[in-house]
Every structure is written in structure tokens, then in C-alpha cells.
Amino acid sequence: MPLDIKICGLKTPETLAAALDGGASHIGFIFFAKSPRYVPPELAGCLREAARGRAKAVAVVVDADDAFLDRIASEMKPDMLQLHGKETPERVAEVKVRYGLPVMKALSVSVAADLGQVAPYLGIADRFLFDAKPPKGSELPGGNGVSFDWRLLQQLDPTLDYLLSGGLNAQNIGEALTLADPPGVDISSGVESAPGQKDVSLIEGFFRAIREARASRAA
């Protein structure tokens, strides 16, 4: 079964190329001003052109209003929207109708009870992303380099479509795949040499670790 791999927070042609060459199914661009991974929509629009026909381009927003989403839709032309804030099921439905795009809803997880957040979005969100809850004091809803107990995801309906995110890197991706067996994974800070600075060698190493882990499991 194929594994979706999303490299998120891309900002340069070189790191985008590394993600595409490694086999990323999705590439993510961050439109949250407080993030060190923020890119303006026009730059994301230029970068995403290289991904056409190779990977789906995802626009990641946090409680964005219609005016900003309009600008992103016009200048970037994403394949999918990722809502990473406190968007309600009603807001997710509004966004889907307004832009005619699939929507991925990010949810923060720390304990088993947090998985109860899924139910209100079923049949509305096209996909989910499970990320670790931000550390106390962090202004970033994601990309904090922290993880949660991946075994919690074993409780999910096996037909649920989601990406596992939060604290992944080349050293622990094998364990994450074994414990959660997710349909997809999402990585950002785990392939950075500094906050917001993607590293080509780390991206390549992440893909290599995934291939090795999947080959080991198959054997």
C-alpha cells in the first residue's frame, strides 16, 4: 500500500526539488505570518508550478479569513487546503463550498480523548492531520518538533484517511510507521537545520529512512 508523504513549509526551489525527487506525494506551503516557514502567496504560486503532475500542493492556513483565502486561491492555485487552526466543522464546510477544493483538517493530539475531535468533522473534512499539541507558550499550532504517543492512533477507524505529523524525523519514522501504520505522514521541522530552513540532505535522509523502514517491514 502506498504511503503519502508530505513535506511541509517549503520555501526554496532547491528544497522543493529534493522533496519532489524523493517522492513526496504532497508539498505544503505555510501561510501563517508568525511561522518561520511563512511564504507569501505569490512565491508559493511560483514554487508550486514545479510540482504540477508530480505532487499535490497544499496551502496551510490558521483561522484565515475569506479575503486571505481568496488571495491564496488566486495566486497559488492550491490542490488542497489545510486548516490548522480552530476552524469549526461549519467553517470547514464553508471553505469547501467557496473554493471547490478538498480540505484537510488538522487536529492536536495529546491523550486518547483528543481523538473525539474527529467525529464532528466526519463527512465534512476530506482528510485529517494529527499533530502534537503545541508546547506551552508556543505561538505555532504546528512545526514545533514535538510528538505524541503514536499508539493512540491504533484506536482510529482503519478506513479514516489521515496524515501523522509532529516530531517526525529520519531517526524515528520507522517506529512511527510500526506503531501507527498511518496512510500518510507529514514532516516540517524534522528536515530543517534551523527553524524554517529546510535542508536538502535531511530531506533525502528522511526519504531514505522511510524506504528502509518499509523494506524491513515487508521482509
Image (cartoon, helix red, strand yellow):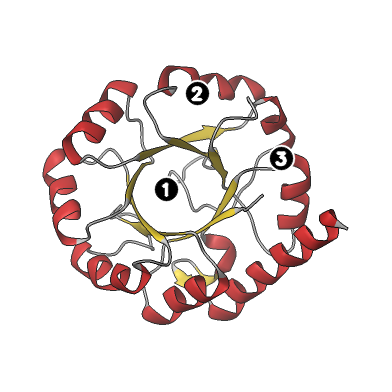
Q: CA distance from mark 2 to mark 3?
A: 17 Å
| Precedes in sequence: disc 3 or disc 1 | 1
Please state which amino acid type lies under the numbered disc 3.
Ala
Q: CA distance from mark 3 to mark 1?
A: 24 Å
Residue name at image x 57 percent, y 72 percent = 22
Residue name at image x 83 percent, y 54 percent = 217
Q: Secondary structure at mark 1?
A: loop
In the picture, which quadrant includes the C terminus? bottom right
Q: Secondary structure at mark 3?
A: helix
Q: Are marks 3 and 1 in contact (CB under 8 Å)?
A: no
Q: Quarter-wise, where is residue 30 in the image?
A: bottom left
Q: Is residue 131 at all visible to an observer of this figure? A: no
Crowd band around label 1 with a 10 angstrom C-alpha radius: few (<14), some (14–19), many (20+):
some
Query: Is label 2 or label 1 in front?
Result: 2
Residue 21, x across and y down, in percent: 52, 76
**Does residue 186 sit above or below 106 in this rendering?**
below
**Does residue 150 sit above or below 5 in this rendering?**
above
Which residue is under mark 2?
118
Residue name at image x 41 percent, y 34 percent = 126
Residue name at image x 22 percent, y 64 percent = 40
In the rendered structure, the answer to whether residue 20 lies left or right of residue 165 reads: left
Residue 159, x across and y down, in percent: 60, 30
Please state which amino acid type lies under the numbered disc 2.
Val
Residue 180, numbered circle: 3
Q: Are marks 2 and 3 in contact (CB under 8 Å)?
A: no
**Does residue 190 sit above or below 50 in this rendering?**
above
Q: Is residue 129 at all visible to an observer of this figure? A: yes
| Precedes in sequence: disc 2 or disc 1 | 2
Please state which amino acid type lies under the numbered disc 1.
Leu
Which residue is under mark 1?
140
Crowd band around label 3 with a 10 angstrom C-alpha radius: few (<14), some (14–19), many (20+):
some
